[in-house]
Amino acid sequence: MSDHRIVCCEQTGCSTSGHIVAVGIGSDPKKAKKRMTVREVWTAMDDGDRFYTADADGNTAWVKKLWCGCGKGSLKSEPDRTTANNLDNLRLCSWSAS
Ligand SMILES: [Zn+2]
């Protein structure tokens, strides 16, 4: 069991708002160390791992499973924190560049 920081995400343009299909994990917000698909994140969550986001001020939010309206699994950060650490506000992953 361990905690993983999500530093970027990949979204798809389904329905009205794109759901997340994969995320980047790492301690440096500018450079993800590892790519995980949503399915891999869900499996890790089932094994007891936790995922969170953090903003520049150190505010964190836990990330939870979310069923997107299109029927596929996605992710959502807990809404009861500042919006600065919301998953939707994370940068998009740029695997080719990093
Ligand atoms: Zn969707």
Image (tube, rainbow, N blue to C red):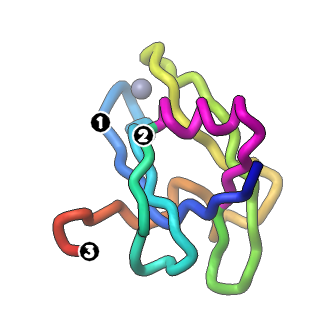
At x 58%, y 23%, the residue is 67
Q: Which is the main secondary structure of the residues drawn in magenta?
A: helix
Residues marked 3 and 1 touching at CB (< 8 Å): no
Element type at mark 1: loop
Residue that mark 1 sits on: 13
The reply, left or right, for residue 84 in relation to residue 81 is: left
Question: Label 1: how many residues lie within 10 Å, few (<14), some (14-19) or many (20+)?
Answer: few
Height in image: 60 above or below 76?
below
Separation of marks 3 and 1 at Cα, in angstroms? 23 Å
Ligand 1 neighbours mark 2 (CB distance < 8 Å): no
First-in-chain label (3 vs 1): 1
Write down which quadrant ligand 1 falls in.
top left
Ligand 1 neighbours mark 1 (CB distance < 8 Å): no
Q: Amino acid at mark 1?
A: Gly
Height in image: 18 above or below 56?
above
Q: Residue furthest top?
A: 71
- Locate residue 97, reporting x and y percent: 19, 73
Height in image: 55 above or below 21?
below
At x 69%, y 39%, the residue is 64
Which numbered circle lies on residue 98? Answer: 3
Dot in front, 3 or 1: 3
Magenta range: 38-52
